[in-house]
Amino acid sequence: MLPVRFGTALLRCNGCAMVSIRHAMFYISTLSTARLQARNRFSTGAVRRLKCQGAHQTPECDGNTGLQRGLFITFEGGEGAGKSTQITRLAKHIRKRRLPVVTTREPGGSPGAEAIRHVLLSGAAETFGPAMEAILFAAARSDHVEQVIRPAVENGKTVLCDRFMDSSRVYQGITGDLDPQFMTALERTALNGLYPDMTLILDITPEEGLRRADERRGKEVADRFEKEGLAVHRRRRKAFLDIAGAEPERCVVIDAGRDEDSIAEDIARAVDGLIDERRSVVKSRRHG
Ligand code: TYD
């Protein structure tokens, strides 16, 4: 075990965690640069608005798929909601529509972010408090966005991501009781303008979700966030639903307490609607 100085605290950790935290420190130091870049870039939402306003042809238009710029779709929800199963099913569905898909997850999804994942889920950062954890999630997200998500979307691929910014809003912001302004600043910096086009919130009672998560985990120990009490999981469920209520244009709530096929059908319908909407905008621009 090696002692590492991190801020004013002394962290004892093994080599792997130390490398991960150094990684995080590097990305945190680049956050201010990312802020500057954010001013010069369009978010996918901004590009969509520009297009709807009948402005210039954007890279979103394409003769083959109708979607040269890919969609960015995130999956959110409490523990055991079945996000990964549904992501696999949706990826298959989108490929059938002849659109290229990338599936990824958070925390993680890029080599730098996967290293930080280990620190977060093992609980190694827990002693430093929710603010430190929120910074580490943001550092991981910044790397994931710049290394994986943005390049894929800009190359016309539809990205399906298991958890994203709403998990930070809920797990760190709401149940971590962090200052909303601090959370907003971290989110803006990590996303650097790349907001999801659609967020599917898989809603399930915490009792059922935790039961499924226990079943899936088998003999493995619960991670840092799974092991929290029922009251915390209930607050998280409400917080996800509050986000959906506040942003109905982006968020779709899916009842995840049902059978797998019914859930997959609802998800496919919602995403097909978004693809068709994008294509019809492209088509009407061509003819208008
Ligand atoms: P993971 O094992 O990836 O699985 P699942 O999504 O099925 O729960 O666990 C990731 C954990 O990290 C999960 O408990 C939620 C938590 N988390 C946050 O607290 N904040 C975040 O920003 C993200 C992305 C995840």
Image (spheres, helix red, strand yellow):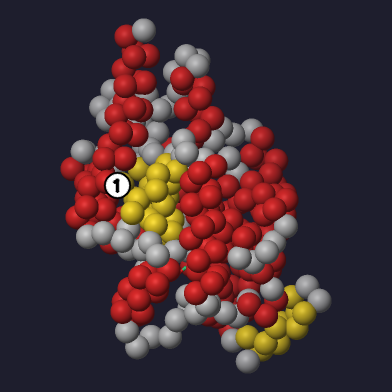
Observer-nearest of 244 and 60: 244
Q: Residue at x 29, y 57 (%)?
A: 86
- Depth check, front residue: 41 or 229: 229
- At x 64% / y 66%, what residue is drawn? 176
Q: Which residue is mark 1?
A: 267
Q: Is residue 242 above or below residue 279?
A: below
- Horizontal arrangement in the rendering, residue 262 relative to residue 40 (left or right): left
Q: What is the quadrant of residue 83 in the picture? A: bottom left
Residue occupying image coordinates x 56% and y 75%: 119
Q: Position of residue 287 (x, y in %)?
A: 32, 9
List the single residue furthest toward the top. 288
Asked if 54 appears above or below 111 in the picture, the reply is above
**Callout 1 amino acid:** Ile
Q: Is mark 1 within 8 Å of ligand 1?
A: no
Q: Is residue 222 visible?
A: yes
Q: Look at the image and tell me whether residue 152 can be seen.
A: no
- The quadrant in which the C terminus is found is top left
What is the tally of numbered marks visible in this picture? 1
Residue 2: which quarter of the image?
A: bottom right
Q: In the image, what residue occupies the spot 48% across and 52% down? A: 241
**Residue 30 picture location, percent across and down:** 68, 54
Q: Position of residue 85 (x, y in %)?
A: 28, 61
Horizontal side of 92 relative to 12 (left or right) equals left
- Which SS class for mark 1? helix
The spot of residue 152 in percent (x, y) is 41, 44
Q: Residue furthest right?
A: 8
Tell me the quarter of the image containing the N terminus.
Answer: bottom right
Label 1: how many residues lie within 10 Å, few (<14), some (14-19) or many (20+)?
many
